[in-house]
Image (cartoon, coloured by chain):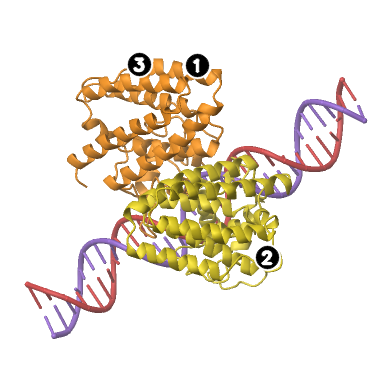
Chain colours: A yellow, B orange, C purple, D red
Amino acid sequence: MMESGAAIPILVEEAMSETLSAQPSAQTVAENVYRSIKSDLLSGALPPGSALLTRDLLARYDCGISPLREALARLVGEQFLEAASHRGVRVPRPSISDVEDVYRIRIALEREALGLALQCGDDDWEADIIATCHRMEKAPLPYHVADQPSAVMEWEARHRAFHFSLIKAAPSPRLLRLIDQMVDQTERYRALRLSGMDRAKLGHDLVAEHRSLMEMVLARDPASLDFLAAHLDRTRIAVSAILREGAAP
Amino acid sequence: MMESGAAIPILVEEAMSETLSAQPSAQTVAENVYRSIKSDLLSGALPPGSALLTRDLLARYDCGISPLREALARLVGEQFLEAASHRGVRVPRPSISDVEDVYRIRIALEREALGLALQCGDDDWEADIIATCHRMEKAPLPYHVADQPSAVMEWEARHRAFHFSLIKAAPSPRLLRLIDQMVDQTERYRALRLSGMDRAKLGHDLVAEHRSLMEMVLARDPASLDFLAAHLDRTRIAVSAILREGAAP
DNA sequence: ATCGTCAATAGTTTGGAAAATTATTTTGAT
DNA sequence: ATCAAAATAATTTTCCAAACTATTGACGAT
């Protein structure tokens, strides 16, 4: 499919995929392939709507059929891919209603998690929030996103880390994992999101908004639940609008 | 290739597993095995804590390695099984904190879904609620659960259908699917739940409580959100208490 | 020209056997 | 007798070829 016909039998684990080459390789091929595919899904290397052909994937990830199928099955279980019997797997297309759906779930769950964190968070939790917020502010979202893709990626990573730090203290592994999955789901629309993001009004509002959020959380203000929900809802509206005006799939 | 050596080309699909023989068989072996294993997990035929050996599973579900592994991988993705590399898959043990976790998520999501359903539900939705409630009341929970296991299962199915009917009108496929998954997760504690359930106080309260819930929902009373949450939370407390006193894993 | 049938092709799914890894037992030395 | 190391056994993981299913294109009938 993509870069087919590579004649050189490369170092399998290390050079498996573009985005994941840095990560520590796992103990099984299936696990590595799983991570690679997931990474490529989130980065957009495997674009929404595309059908994944077995033999292309075999070449792309340089492995046998069994681990590939296992990785795909797991991703189907996590709803990152959709399967039709005897017709292979596809990358789901982004739809506005689906984005709204994901954000709705995410808001409900993050609100719950933040409530727990406010109850259970200790000093380390507070320190971590302050630290991740600082990191986020030190790598601000560029004015024109198209110009500096790597800077944008860095900001996104730190932004995500900040949001996670707020709820990290919630003693609910499942809840945190589920939220992480929902965030992953929204990552897939990164390309679309960024394309409409660069008027800098966003960038400015964001800094102030995140600061307010942090201060309310550190003060254990119960109103921070609503504030977080509103913050996420603004993102939902923005993403949804971008999807509406942008590409019409 | 399929049933090697067997002279008679038997109906593979039908005789595959105990619990799933009635279901319409799917178009691939992997799908059938997936359903069978999931069903056996929910029914308790594959008890929590047990390690699943490939050999045994191959015999039990009468299939080849490939579809079996595919089914297992999918269940791992849905968190019904946990995998350790080169050490196979296990059925997770029930822990009190995990039960609390699942219920917490379920409550947050069902509250959200019910809110949407109140906005979007139409006449058919209302009719369906009344119908499923009627069915539930017609197959009440037996006084002593141990005596009539099939009656208990019937009640559980109808009870579940009733709860789902309340939120069915929410236009959020992902949300509904996620709730369904959480309900599945709680199903696994069925055996434990039932063992401590049979003082009939529960049975009586339940009928009245469900009636009240239904009436509030049909009246589109916003307070029904809190009522549903409280109802589910009572279940959480009950299940949690049973786990605490019962088996101590 | 349009529709339906049928063969050829492309792609997915499956079973089994070989390779790799982990667990268990045996052996040998202190 | 105890412990470490080697050998063996059990189990998971992987590759691969065979079987099956869907799709495409050609051909003939209406």
Report the disc number at residue B137.
Answer: 3
Work out whether C10 lies above or below A101: below
Report the disc number at residue B127.
Answer: 1
Work out whether B27 lies above or below A63: above
Q: Quadrant of residue A17?
A: bottom right
Q: Position of residue B157 (x, y in %)?
A: 38, 25
- Separation of residues labelled 1 and 2 (CA atoms): 54 Å
- The residue that appears at 45% across and 29% down in the rendered structure is B14
Of B2 and A159, the residue lying toward us? A159
**Residue A30 seen in this snapshot:** no
Q: Are marks 1 and 2 on the same chain?
A: no
Q: Quadrant of the N terminus of chain A?
A: bottom right
**Residue A163 seen in this snapshot:** yes
Q: Position of residue A46 (x, y in %)?
A: 64, 56
**Is the residue under label 2 in contact with that under label 3 (CB below 8 Å)?**
no
Q: Which element carries disc 1, helix, strand or loop?
A: helix
Q: Quadrant of residue B161?
A: top left
Q: Are marks 3 and 2 on the same chain?
A: no
Report the disc number at residue A143.
Answer: 2
**Is the residue under label 1 in contact with that under label 3 (CB below 8 Å)?**
no
- Separation of residues labelled 3 and 2 (CA atoms): 62 Å
Label 2: chain letter: A
Q: Position of residue B232 (x, y in %)?
A: 35, 33
- Separation of residues labelled 3 and 1 (CA atoms): 16 Å
Q: Is residue A100 left or right of residue A216?
A: right
Between discs 3 and 1, the one toward the N terminus: 1
Q: Which element carries disc 2, helix, strand or loop?
A: loop
Q: Nearer the viewer, mark 3 or mark 2?
A: 2
Q: Are marks 3 and 1 on the same chain?
A: yes
Of B144 and B109, the residue lying toward us? B109
